[in-house]
Image (cartoon, rainbow, N blue to C red):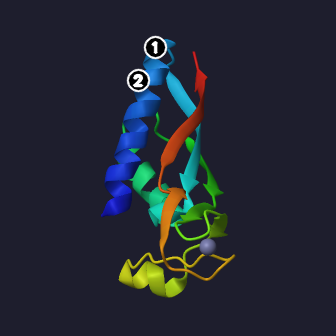
Amino acid sequence: MHEFSFAYDIFKVAESTALKYNATKITEVLLEIGELTLIVPELLKRSFEMATKGSIAEGAKLNIKMLPGKIKCRECDKVSEVSITKEAQLTGLQLFQCSHCGSNNTEIVEGKKANVKNIKIQE
Ligand SMILES: [Zn+2]
């Protein structure tokens, strides 16, 4: 499951940051997730709970901010905002149309990354 390995990575990042500050507990993790990662927030939250069981991040609140995807058109060079449709989510197909000229000759420039933005800890 995509979400589980991702949740584990988040946990590892949060944990190493917390340890640097001699924290005894992580209370909250703020995440930014690009919409085009196809990560499902609800699944991620559940995976995070599983991944952190028995660790200093157990019970930490996962705060997720979704960022819209952006594509750049190779024909007209303009940037459009895109979001994943239900079909794309089911098939994994990611073909986006330029909203300016309608071309499919586009590349994704934003929305495929996920970052730990911030964590809250207790010392
Ligand atoms: Zn275009």
Residue 51 appears at what percent x and percent y? 36, 46
* Mark 2 residue type: Ser
Q: Which mark is residue 20?
A: 1
Toward the viewer: 48 or 74? 74
- The structure residue drawn at horizontal position 46% and vertical position 81%, both measured from the top left corner, is 88
> Which residue has dot 2 on it?
16
Residue 11 appears at what percent x and percent y? 41, 38
Q: Using the rendered image of the protein, determine whether residue 123 is visible from the camera's viewpoint.
A: yes
- The structure residue drawn at horizontal position 31% and vertical position 52%, both measured from the top left corner, is 5
Element class at badge 1:
helix
Alpha carbon of mark 1 to alpha carbon of mark 2: how far? 6 Å
Tell me whether the residue at label 1 lies in contact with that at label 2, contact meaning CB atoms closer than 8 angstroms. Answer: yes
Toward the viewer: 23 or 9? 9
* Mark 1 residue type: Lys
- Ligand 1, seen in the image, is in the quarter at bottom right
Residue 123 appears at what percent x and percent y? 57, 15
Q: Which class describes the residues within 10 Å of circle 2: few (<14), some (14-19), or many (20+)?
A: few
Say whether mark 1 is within 8 Å of ligand 1: no
State whether residue 55 is above or below residue 79: above
Residue 68 appears at what percent x and percent y? 63, 61
Element class at badge 2:
helix
Q: Quadrant of the N terminus?
A: bottom left
- Circle count: 2
